[in-house]
Amino acid sequence: MVALAKFLIFIGIVLLVTGMVLYVIGRFTPLGRLPGDIVIKRERFVFYFPIMTSLLLSLVLTFLFFVISRIGR
């Protein structure tokens, strides 16, 4: 039971730090508002699909995981 408690505390800390980083990044970078992101606003409806933001994050994460896998060898 102690191991599960430590694991849950660790996951909570990771989620907290990730949330704080995303909050700070969102305030100072245009992520989510890049050219190519689709936003459709109607009277009582907003549709948002961040295509370019998704592609950019995918490229960055792919590069990051590639570098991490090379270091681990």
Image (cartoon, helix red, strand yellow):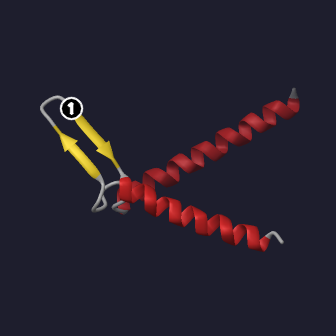
* Residue 33 image position (x, y, % from top left): 30, 56
Residue reaching furthest to the top: 1
Quadrant in which residue 54 is drawn: bottom left
Q: Is residue 68 above or below residue 43?
A: below
The secondary element bearing badge 1 is classed as loop
Residue at image location 52% in from the left, 46% down from the top: 19
Q: Amino acid at mark 1?
A: Phe
Q: Is residue 20 above or below residue 35?
A: above
Looking at the image, residue 40 sits to the left or right of residue 2; the answer is: left
Q: Quadrant of the C terminus?
A: bottom right
Residue at image location 52% in from the left, 65% down from the top: 59
Quadrant in which residue 4 is drawn: top right
* Residue 50 image position (x, y, % from top left): 36, 51
Is 21 or 71 nearer to us in this picture? 71
* Residue 26 image position (x, y, % from top left): 39, 55
Q: How many marks?
A: 1
Looking at the image, residue 2 sits to the left or right of residue 56; the answer is: right
* Residue placed under numbered mark 1 in the picture: 45
Is 24 or 68 nearer to us in this picture? 68
